[in-house]
Image (cartoon, rainbow, N blue to C red):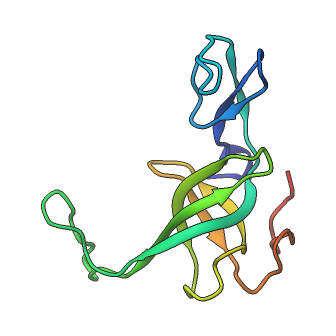
Amino acid sequence: MTENDRVLMGSECSTCGTVGFPATAHCARCATATATPRALSTQGTVWTYTVQRFAPKSPPYVPPPDGFSPFAMGYVELPEGIRVAGILDCETFDGLMGAPAVLIATEPVPRFAVHPDEPAGAAIPGEVPR
């Protein structure tokens, strides 16, 4: 996946200006059918998170060959004022609240790289600001 492929598509209502995710034709606030697609920011801030420390039930979950590893799931708040749920790729679970996050994948669930050692709002090294 290239930098240009990393896009979350949301929608914006032309009546009330509400931005939503995922994209839809109807506005979640005013319920009119006036929402149009729009690309969302690829950088945000971790708003909240939880850590999945045990493997989900199998089936339907199929553990990877090297076994289950704990992972963080959370909400990343984007500059548009919306929060997007996704997997948080990080080396440690310490200091995630308010940490900068950058979109790294969109399928099947949004995935964000998180660097808790960077101050909130800081550009993450190697990433192009959008």
Which residue: 74% across, 59% down?
A: 44
Q: Is residue 112 left or right of residue 58?
A: right
Give x and y (percent) for residue 8. Answer: 64, 42
Above or below residue 93? Residue 1 is above
Above or below residue 75? Residue 37 is above
Above or below residue 14? Residue 42 is below
Which residue: 64% across, 26% down?
A: 29
Q: Residue furthest top?
A: 33
**Which of the 4 quarters of the picture holds residue 77?**
bottom right
Above or below residue 50? Residue 82 is above
Give x and y (percent) for residue 90. Answer: 58, 79
Give x and y (percent) for residue 100. Answer: 75, 70
Which residue: 73% across, 41% down?
A: 40
Q: Residue furthest left?
A: 59
Q: Is residue 35 left or right of residue 93?
A: right
Q: Residue furthest front?
A: 30
**Which of the 4 quarters of the picture holds residue 122?**
bottom right
Give x and y (percent) for residue 72. Answer: 48, 73
Who is closer to the viewer here, 83 or 71? 83
Who is closer to the viewer here, 16 or 71? 16
Who is closer to the viewer here, 63 or 78? 78
**Which of the 4 quarters of the picture holds residue 17?**
top right
Who is closer to the viewer here, 28 or 46? 28
Q: Is residue 68 left or right of residue 61?
A: right
Which residue: 67% across, 43% down?
A: 7
Number of dots carrying numbers:
0
